[in-house]
Structure formats: C-alpha cells, structure tokens
Image (tube, rainbow, N blue to C red):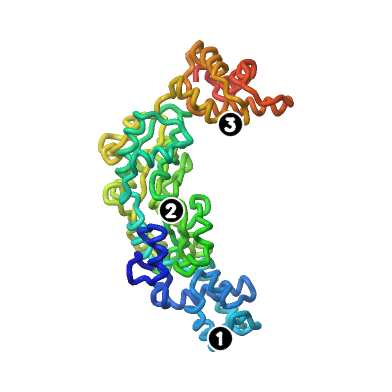
Amino acid sequence: MSITDSSSGSLDILATILSDEAFRPSKPATLAETGLPVSLIEALICKRLLLAGHRSGRQLADEICLPFQLIEPLYRNLRGRQILVHHGSAPLNDYVYTLTENGRERANREMAACAYVGPAPVPLLDYVLSAEAQTIRVESPKENQLIDAFKDITIDTELFDSLGPAINSGAGLFLYGQPGNGKSTLARKITQCFGQQIWIPHAIFEDGQVIKVYDAAFHETSREENRSILKDAAFDQRWLKIKRPTVVVGGELTLDSLEIRHDDRVNVSEAPLQMKSNCGCLLIDDFGRQQIEPTELLNRWIIPLESRVDFLTLASGKKIQVPFEQLIIFSTNLEPADLVDEAFLRRIPYKIEIRDPDIAEFHQLFKIYCPLFKCQYDDKIIDYLIQTHYTATGRAMRRCHPRDLLGQIRNFCAYNGLPMRLLPEYFDRVVSSYFTVVLGNENV
C-alpha cells in the first residue's frame, strides 16, 4: 500500500490521473509489501479450505483478496509440508486444492485461535496513512457544492451562509431546533459536499489482532469501481472503494460502542463507530437522550476533537493511535448550553439553529413531495391547510409535515379505492388523526 506516486506503476498512474484521487492502494508486488506475516496468509488459506472443502488456487486468491502470483508459492510450500493436496486440475495452469488430514488439524487450530476468514487485512500503518490522505479537512466545499448536495431539499440562504464555513472547518457542529425540521436529513446531506468516494480496508491487522472495519450497515460500496477488470489490475483488492460514510447513531449510543469491541469466542475485533465514520460524518442524533450523560461522551472525545487522533485499546491490552478524521455533528432538540458547559462548547465551534419553515418554504416542500406521491400540487389547497390547521390553531409548521400528511392521504385513498388527490376534506381527516393521535399535542 502507498499513496500513489510515480513509482507505483503505469496502471496506478493512469488510474490516478483518470480518477483524480489523492490516495489509491497499490497492488502489492511481493509478499513483503502486503505487510502481513506469511503465517497469517497461510492460516487464511487453510481456514478457507476448511469451510469450502476445495478451491482452485485462483479462487482462494480472490477470496482472500491477494494476487494469485504472490501466494502461488505458498500453495507449493503447503503442499510440500503435506498441508494441502491437489484435488484436480484447474484452467490457466492452476490446481484445485483440498486439505490433508494434517491440514484439517492445522485449520481447526487456526480457527480456534481466530475465526476470521474474510479478505486479508492491511497493516494499521497503511490504514492511518489512508485516512490522513483522504480526510475531509483537505477539501473546501464551495457554495455550488453545497447547492448540489442539498438540491433535493429546501434550505434558505441564511442557513447556507452558516453551514458553509462550518462544513469547511471539518470541526464539530451542533444542529439544534424543534423536532421534525430535518436536522438529521441535513446532516446526511453534508457528507455529499465533499469528494464522493474513499478507500477503506476490509480489516486491519495489528499486534496479532484482526479488526474489522468494513460494515455494510454504514458503508456503501462503489460496485463499478470494485468490479472493473482494468481497476482490479491496478489496486490492492484488500481495499474497497465506498461512498464517504455517514454513520448515524441515536439513543442506543454507549461508551462501549466507541471502543474496539472484541469477541472472545472467535477472537476477532470490530472497529468502533468513529473509525467506521473516518473521512466522512458521524451524526449523534437526538443528542442528550443517550443512555450516557452528554458530559461523559464529550469527556471521551476531548483529546480526539482537538488533536484529530484517538487512542484505542486492543484485546491484548496494547494502546494504538488511530485517525479521528470526520466531521462530528450533534443533532438535538435541546439548547446546546443546557447540555454541556462552556468548555465543551468551545470544542464544538459551530452551533446552528434549524428554524421552522415559513409559508413559502412550506409550499415548496409540498411541490417537492407531491410528484413523489403521484398527485397534483395545488397551492390553493395548501393555503387552505395552512390557514385552517396552522394559522387558526397556532400550530407550528415543521418540515416533516408535508411528507407525513401526504403519506396519510395516500394511505386513506388506497384503503378507500380513491384517486390520490389534494382535497380539503382529505386534509381535515388526516390532520385530526396525525396531530391528535400521533403527536398527542394539538399545538405541535
């Protein structure tokens, strides 16, 4: 692995020019360049065969994500030590391999020691270099990039003026205001203001420990890039190209989820949430309502917020230093000053209030959502809704209301076999149900 430069080979140079990437994981040319002990690679080969029964050499290479030409000598060595045996021939001067009795014994020992059987990991140092090269702090999104990222939601100019510098800082950010005004949606859109794709490893190896980084719940892969034959020849397959991540956690957040989690049963570790969000955004949704006190959470992050590095503990007890390279966004319905003291607020330099929409924006939201619900927008009907069910009752408008009310109208029409339309009587029916029953507060 390396940050791509003129020594990385013609394919890497071409790929970098075409993709305009600051970082690209170079395909290892030797086993030493993988940064892994040979014993670890042999263990992965044996464990894969234990699970699969038999595989060709190229199939095994694809499954552990290392070049076939690098590990072919390992097959011969393992065969000479009576760990593997030929099970048959395979195309392109390859063989199908299976384990011997000795091989199965070794594979079972390896499985008991560590049950990880995924792609070969990368050394911790390679991961550190990748995160530093791909950090969002080296980018400076301009107004046109913000407009593009937020093009499918409504946002006023004043908010743009506040968000722009906050996003450029790459530092902490508070989004606060009444519930239902799109704070979480806004936070997810912020990630799109930066370069769209980054590289992450499937897993990391340090001090004999395998730490899984890739998480399908948070990481969306770039399938075209990862499956391209030309690209396959140019990059290290132990890495995945993904969209910049937005990791969202809410009331379930605990201090344990911010540490490396080790499973003693299989001897495999899982990266914490802040590592999974590196080079993207980490959204703490509904901040202040977690099982832990806000001050406990911020105490945990005092050093990372200032130094941009975090210190984690491996199962062996060894302390490691990892990048803390994400934009942390705290979304809350409470006043930030009511949650934490002034010292903590200094470490989260931007506090932006998300206010209720005005009448013009409320109309605009209906214009956006009506095509999604396959109905015709009618400004007179929306005026009726606002005057009857908001102005007359003193009810505050929220950005989630147009979507939610249209959803209730669609369900009412579907149940009764009626065409989806905006009618005053439909709004009268669903407003009564939505506000009285769902929210339990006529004035919300």
Which element type, helix, strand or loop, lies under badge 2?
A: strand
The residue drawn where x is 53% and y is 73% is 61
Residue at point 64%, 16% (across, down): 425
How much space separates mark 2 and mark 3, taking CA atoms?
30 Å
**Foreground tag (2 vs 3):** 3
Left or right of residue 252: residue 33? left
Q: Position of residue 163 (x, y in %)?
A: 34, 36
The answer to which of marks 2 and 3 sits earlier in the sequence is 2
Q: Position of residue 274 (x, y in %)?
A: 40, 50
Q: Which residue is mark 1?
A: 79
Q: Is residue 48 visible?
A: yes
Above or below for 405 versus 190:
above
Please identify the residue farthest to the top as the structure is shown: 392
The quadrant in which the N terminus is found is bottom left
Q: In the rendered structure, are the residues bearing label 2 and label 3 in contact, judged by CB atoms less than 8 Å apart?
A: no
Question: Along the polypeptide, which appears first: circle 1 or circle 2?
Answer: 1
Please state the horizontal and vertical placement of residue 47, each as a whole percent of the image.
56, 73
Q: Amino acid at mark 2?
A: Gln
Q: Is residue 116 visible?
A: no
Figure quadrant of residue 291: top left
- Element type at marker 1? helix
On the image, numbered disc 3 is attached to which residue?
A: 371
Please, what is the three-letter code of the amino acid marked with disc 1? Arg
Give the amino acid at mark 3: Pro
